[in-house]
Amino acid sequence: MEPYELPLTEASARIKARELSPVELVDSALARLEQVEPHLNAFACVTADAARNAARMAQEEIATGRYRGPLHGIPVGVKDLYDTAGVPTTSSSRVWEGRVPDADAVTVEALGRAGMVLLGKTHTHEFAYGPITPTTRNPWNVGCIPGGSSGGSGAAVAAGVCTVGMGTDTAGSIRIPAALCGTVGIKATYGRVSRRGIAPLSWSLDHAGPLTRHVTDAALVLGAIAGYDQRDPACVDVPVPDYTQGLDDGIQGLRIGVPRNYFFEHVSTDVERGVRQAISVLEGLGASVREVEVPYAELTLATEWAILMPEASSYHQKHLRDRPDHYTPDVRELLEAGELIFATDYIKALRVRTLMQRAWADLLDEVDIVVTPGMPCAAPEAGATDVTWEDGAAENITFALTRLTSPSNLTGLPTLAVPVGFDPAGLPVGMQIIGRPFEEATILRVGRAYEAASDTVGRIADVTA
Amino acid sequence: MVAPNRDLDTQTVTTLARAARLELPADRVDTLAPLTADIYALIDSLDAVSPGEVPPATAFDARRR
């Protein structure tokens, strides 16, 4: 087994025991990057020299007794939306071509304090405005999309290049590539992780978080980046627990809600089968399962897009007038259309969001978590504009890929994406586990219980052209 | 809520864009009109609920119950 193939916790244990040096691990990751990047194009920018220097520094620190913890020396790819001091940060857009920030995003600083080694910046759908990431391909089938907008991170983690990839999530952009690339991904509670230094898409819906190969990895990274930041107005001053504590305590007695409406409508047979099998696994581990009605679900897309579009257009208002040709056509169109949404419609959507949040709070009094499909389908082919369902209906790909994930952005609820298997074409399918506000530990414990009882989590794609 | 359908032709899109101080060449308007019509239709589905006295949730607030 090559070092890059090691699960994070095993690599970490070997680094701590000085059986593996961060230099060996980073060299192995960079060799893997060189091997697969021509097929994936997951990276907007690779920082190989800086990564090797950082790995040497980590090795020296560990050798001299300054071990920082389980993320020390672990390679990470950071979405090109996050500011990284001295490293080009363009949000995968010509609009920001040549932009080099002089400071790290708060979360990047936190990863640095934990000793993680930056391998490079991973591609995003331009300014995170889309679920495709057209620059990049899916490691399980390079003819397919990786999902987005954190598609570079999803592809890099699934291909074994990075042990961890950082993402952002406004309508599902961590969970979409996690599901389509077969990785774990966590969008914590709104306000749990600072977004300062990350280009916004929609301030009231944006979240930051990791994509990882295993559930424990997600717990470790979330522990490193979570916390109050008084300069992010969304941040909430709630103590950060050790998310690895109790991770293996099991789920005996946990009450799981499974939606009877919306979440299984226009979902592929393979996805439905995989998710229902996963729910049976959780039931077999001692959880109780009951059907629930998800409130206002049919208004999800209307509410999400009525909020997201004007917020995004507001942020891009000046650039859209100064250099409209620098945007890719799909993003430019959405930004222009967002300019034409009435304030009264935007506020109406915000009021519907209040109703949704209240109703979800009531729902999560009845059950501890809600489990749903992560995506309605496996990864679509690159270039597809629609998803066609078994009844012949065609659905716009952007709406198809965001309709199951958006409820957690509107409600702010913590949600974990976990792979549950593969379809007959060898493409991953996944579930999402939705919990109560600030109960990330619960959804991680459920994800970990499923992971331990199955063999679907933590696989690395071969990547063949 | 009972409201008439929005009447959205290319001229209306041009007028709306001007009101937003966004100059759009004719070919852009042709592209934008159908997308905007789709987005308006989506947003109009919110008419299915009556928010009454419900205030807006500008973001998630963990303290709100």
Image (spheres, grey):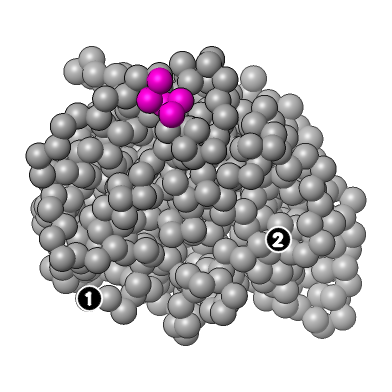
- Report the residue at 87% width, 80% height from top: A64
Boundaries of the magenta span: B11-15
Residue topped by disc 2: A74
- Report the residue at 16% width, 43% height from top: B47
Residue topped by disc 1: B65
Is residue A159 visible in this depiction of the protein?
A: no
Residue A341 located within the stretch drawn in magenta: no
From what the image shows, is residue A242 above or below residue A292? below
- The location of residue A399, given as percent across then percent down, is 35, 33
Within-10-Å neighbours for mark 1: few <14, some 14–19, many 20+:
few
User: Residue B7 is drawn in which quadrant?
Assistant: top left
Give amino acid for label 1.
Answer: Arg
- The location of residue A266, given as percent across then percent down, is 23, 30
From what the image shows, is residue A230 above or below residue A118? below
- The location of residue A141, given as percent across then percent down, is 54, 25
Q: What chain letter is assigned to the residue under label 1?
A: B
